[in-house]
Image (tube, grey):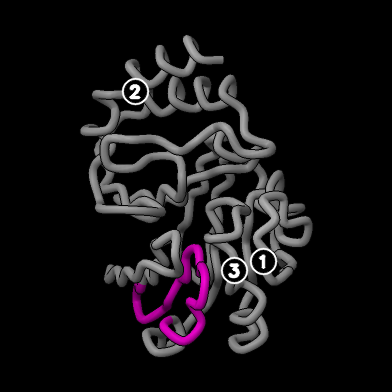
C-alpha cells in the first residue's frame, strides 16, 4: 500500500490517494484537489468521501467528470453534496453509491470497510483499508471533530466515541486535518472527550 497526502485549500483538508496493487482510491478531494489528483494517479478507480462537508467534497464533481469513476458517500450525508449546509458555495456533485452504515465494500478487488461514527455529521464515517483508518473529521491527533455545525450532534458523538473505544487492534489514523496518529493513542483520551461533551450538551 502506498499513501499520498496533500492538504487542500484554506482549511488544509487532507486529500489522500491510497494505491493498492496499482489501483488508486481517492479519499476526500477538497478545494482545488483536481490537478494534484490527476498528477498523482495512474489508475484511479473510485472517489470515497468520509462525510459531506464542503472542504472534503469540493472537487468531487470535477473529478467524476474527468475520470469517469464512481463516487461513494455515507448515505446520511448525500444531501450535503447539493444542499451546501455550511453555505460555502461548494460545487454540487452526486454520489453513485450510497454507503449504508458499517458497510463492507469490495472495489475492484480492494476490500474497504466503512465504519459509521455520526456526530460531526449524520453520516460521518471512517474508511478502513487493511490496517489504516482514513478518519475524516472524526478523530485527529489528540482531538476530535466538532459537533456544533448544522446537522451535528453531541449526543451522537458521545455514542460514536463509546463505539470507537471498544474497537480492538491498532490502526494508523490518517485524519482529515493534521498529522497521523494511532487508534490506541487516541483511545486514551476518549473518556475525557465523552465527559466533556456530556457536560456541555
Residue at (64% x, 50% y) in the render: 74
Please name the residue that numbered disc 1 is placed on.
90
Magenta-drawn segment: 19-36
In this rendering, the label closer to the viewer, 2 or 3: 3
> Which dot marks residue 119?
none
- Answer few, some or many: residues within 10 Å of disc 3's Cα (few below 14, many 20 plus, some between 14 and 19): many
Residue 35 highlighted magenta (yes or no): yes
- Helix, strand or loop under label 1: loop
What's the distance in space between the residues labelled 2 and 3, CA to CA?
A: 30 Å
Q: Which residue is mark 3?
A: 58
Identity of the residue drawn at 49% across and 36% down: 146
Q: On the image, which quarter does residue 184 sit in?
A: top left
User: Is residue 126 one of those drawn in magenta?
Assistant: no
44 up-or-down from 141: above or below:
below
Q: Quadrant of the N terminus?
A: bottom left
Q: Position of residue 70 (x, y in %)?
A: 64, 73
Q: Secondary structure at mark 3?
A: loop
- Measured along the vertical axis of the image, is residue 170 above or below residue 47? above
Q: Depth-wise, is mark 2 or mark 1 nearer the camera?
A: 1
Amino acid at each position: 500500500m502506498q499513501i499520498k497526502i496533500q492538504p487542500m485549500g484554506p482549511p488544509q483538508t487532507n486529500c489522500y490517494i491510497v494505491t493498492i496493487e496499482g489501483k488508486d482510491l481517492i479519499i476526500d478531494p477538497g478545494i482545488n484537489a483536481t490537478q494534484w489528483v490527476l498528477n498523482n494517479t495512474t489508475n484511479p478507480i473510485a472517489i470515497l468521501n468520509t462525510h459531506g462537508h464542503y472542504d472534503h467534497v469540493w472537487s468531487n464533481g470535477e473529478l467524476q467528470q474527468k475520470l469517469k469513476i464512481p463516487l461513494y458517500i455515507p448515505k446520511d450525508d448525500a444531501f450535503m453534496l447539493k444542499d451546501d449546509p455550511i453555505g460555502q458555495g461548494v460545487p454540487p456533485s452526486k454520489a453513485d453509491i450510497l454507503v449504508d452504515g458499517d458497510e463492507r465494500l469490495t472495489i475492484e478487488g480492494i476490500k474497504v470497510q466503512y465504519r459509521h461514527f455520526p456526530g460531526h455529521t449524520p453520516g460521518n464515517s471512517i474508511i478502513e483499508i487493511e490496517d489504516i483508518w482514513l478518519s475524516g473529521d472524526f478523530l485527529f491527533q489528540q482531538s476530535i471533530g466538532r459537533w456544533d455545525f448544522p446537522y451535528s450532534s453531541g449526543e451522537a458523538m458521545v455514542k460514536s466515541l463509546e463505539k470507537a473505544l471498544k474497537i480492538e487492534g491498532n490502526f494508523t489514523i490518517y485524519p482529515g486535518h493534521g498529522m497521523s496518529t494511532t487508534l490506541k493513542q487516541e483511545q486514551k483520551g476518549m473518556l475525557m472527550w465523552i465527559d466533556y461533551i456530556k457536560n456541555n450538551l
